[in-house]
Amino acid sequence: MKEYQTITEISGPLVYAEVDEPIGYDEMVEIETDDGRTLRGQVLESSDGIVAIQVFEGTSGIDRKASVRFLGETLKLPVTEDLLGRVMDGSGQPIDDGPEIVPEERRDIIGAAINPYSREYPEEFIQTGVSAIDGMNTLVRGQKLPIFSASGLPHNNLALQIARQATVPEDDEEGGSEFAVVFGAMGITQEEANEFMQDFERTGALERSVVFMNLADDPAVERTVTPRLALTTAEYLAFDKDYHVLVILTDMTNYCEALREIGAAREEVPGRRGYPGYMYTDLAQLYERAGRIEGRAGSVTQIPILTMPGDDDTHPIPDLTGYITEGQIYIDRALNSQGIQPPINPLPSLSRLMDDGIGEGLTREDHSDVANQMYAAYAEGENLRDLVNIVGREALSERDNKYLDFADRFEAEFIQQGYDTNRSIEETLSIGWELLSSLPKSELNRVDEEFIEKYYLEDDAETAEVTAD
């Protein structure tokens, strides 16, 4: 381990130092300042004779006389099952006044995507307790399903609801693997952090969770480490301890802003809207760490949350995220303004793996048909709302009015459930049939006749005896 006093430049979160030996990419660094502080850093770029070091605690107090030590290893996280119930800062240090963590091993946080040959196809249902997700955009084990939100919308409330409610059905074949949540927060305010912790402690969800907190006033460089710490913990619990792990990462927009800040400090040629050209690759390195491995009982499922700048889903962050992941859940500003909780809009939302995770033996035999019919009926109602604004409701046929009523009830009874209500998939599908039974049987052209006979509620349909015009 060599020590240098050869700092040549300090730029933002970066320190440049001259070296006389090869230094590895991502190698850990200790910088000792004149006032006796020891700061941690990581090699961001290594070339002949000079290295760029990103400093986790910020570069304040560092001058050219500071000593630089290269440790010869990458950043490692001490992992153990005892991490469950603990709260860490964005660099992996405990901040909950708990007992000292005695690790089983120290694991490299960089990780890697799962080998495609060893990857198992995701096809088991995860129940979040949120009808708009479970019923219409089902999450399955091993999937990566982001939530697209925007500034001022209650994505944090939804994240907490999923964190405390999410469960997997008992799997006899696997011996009923336990469920755990890894929660990684990046660039959040102290107020948001307090709300998260109060909710975790109030509901008891902390007992089965590992929480990583990177605050808005923490160094941006630390923000690039936080999701990797969370995913390393998740992989250990899933593939070494056989847990089904749900990883919630919020807010990926803050993570990408940190990438842009570091890129600007390195004077890189910017890509779209100033973000680094390698942002797609960087995000893929995180998202592709979700999945299942053949022969292992555990799984890693990801729900990254991002706020779309200017509500623009063509912005590079949601755009690239949509390419990498398997769908998206949209938080809708119009539904939120109506007081709908959670304000999830099923129409632009999508879970590409839903069809493989539902049906007989997984959720219920009629799940797919009910979801398809509700989607079609709600879309019809939404289109008719635009027409009502032009011609008025009186000009519409009785059939059209039934679809308008369906859209209103769908929002008020199916999507609306509050943040403290935990619905089983049976309850979700039952509400779906109550709504579909307000339409004539002749309109249910996406539902198998067998299911109509079994689940259609004739009492609710007395007012729906209207033939299509």
Image (cartoon, grey):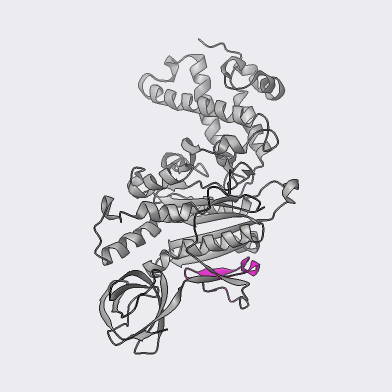
Q: Main secondary structure of the magenta part?
A: loop
Q: Where is residue 134 in the image (x, y as percent from the top left)?
A: 59, 40
The residue closer to the viewer here, 89 or 69, is 69
Quadrant in the rendering for residue 298? bottom right
Q: In this view, does 258 lie above or below 100?
A: above
Which residue is found at the position 47% from the left and 52% from the top? 287
Q: Is residue 112 above or below residue 432?
A: below
The residue closer to the viewer here, 280 or 91, is 280
Q: How many marks?
A: 0
Q: Position of residue 307 (x, y in %)?
A: 40, 51
Q: In this view, does 158 lie to the left or right of 54?
A: right
Q: Where is residue 42 in the image (x, y as percent from the top left)?
A: 39, 72
Which residue is found at the position 38% from the left and 47% from the top? 320
Regarding residue 135, the answer to whether it shows in the image is no
Residue 369 on the magenta span = no
Which residues fall within the magenta stretch? 78-97
Q: Is residue 108 left or right of residue 310?
A: right
Q: Position of residue 384 (x, y in %)?
A: 43, 23
Which residue is found at the position 36% from the left and 45% from the top? 311
**Which quadrant of the rendered structure holds the N terminus?**
bottom left
Q: Which residue lies furthest to the bottom in this view?
A: 35
Residue 83 on the magenta span = yes
Regarding residue 348, the answer to whether it shows in the image is yes
Q: In this view, does 219 lie above or below 333?
A: below
